[in-house]
Image (tube, grey):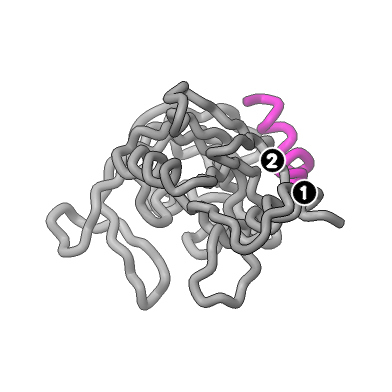
Amino acid sequence: MSFADALDILLEDNHVVAVNKPAGWPTTHFDGTDETIDRVVKAYLKEKYQKPGNVFLGVVHRLDKPVSGALLFARTSKAAARLSEQFREGAVEKTYWAVVAGDRLPDAGSFEDYLRKDDEAARVEVVPAGTPGAQLARLLYTVRARHGGLALVELRPHTGRKHQLRVQLASRGSPIYGDAKYGGRGNLGPAIGLHARALTFLHPTSKAPTTVTAEVPPPWRGRFAHLLAGG
């Protein structure tokens, strides 16, 4: 099997490549032990273009290991700098779909919290404003469908904090399906019920608004068919 067979390519040109990341894979490596999506994408580019030596691939944002969906990389250092700036300044429009427990959420609304990392517990927690180390986290949401004690929620974060969507939903009694770290029930194997549905950004060279959309993974189409049909 070639590396191309292992990837769902959403967009590819000389400057960027976007993939539909499977759940269970880290975006990039920290200790050098896990296989990672960035390594697979590098191998794919090396194989496709028969490039000698190392292949440049800029990691401009990340998805948590149990999260699937749209993931964007830069193919040049100039594109990496320009895209990283867009993510840093909040200029990239990010859309997520989440399957959450219960019917506690109103049909639409916004969340604003202060979040702090608890490195010892490898978690993030909601804390009062002014707490040392706390960062402001904002998002807008819309409930797309409800069925069988679950809801399909569309999330548009305005900030990009670690575990932001997971902890903000859980703190309101609506943990993400399968996200045991934050109180979610159910089992999706290596995944949780959180999917990066779409990214809209300015192309780093043409400056044209560009959107990539990632289909939900196969387990969703079986287990959450009623929610997806209603959404």
Residue 187 in view (yes/no): no
Q: Report the magenta stretch's main SS.
A: helix
Mark 1 surroundings: few (<14), some (14-19) or many (≥20) residues within 10 A: some
Q: Amino acid at mark 1?
A: Ala
What residue is pinned by disc 2?
9
Seen in the picture, residue 113 relative to 25 is either above or below; the reply is: above
Q: Residue furthest right?
A: 1
What residue is pinned by disc 1?
4
User: Is residue 218 within the magenta segment?
Assistant: yes
Q: Is residue 78 left or right of residue 115?
A: right
Give x and y (percent) for residue 189: 70, 61
Q: Amino acid at mark 2?
A: Ile
Seen in the picture, residue 74 relative to 1 is either above or below; the reply is: above
Residue appearing at x 49%, y 71% in the figure: 30
What's the magenta region? 216-231
Q: Earlier in the sequence, mark 1 or mark 2?
A: 1
Q: CA distance from mark 1 to mark 2?
A: 8 Å
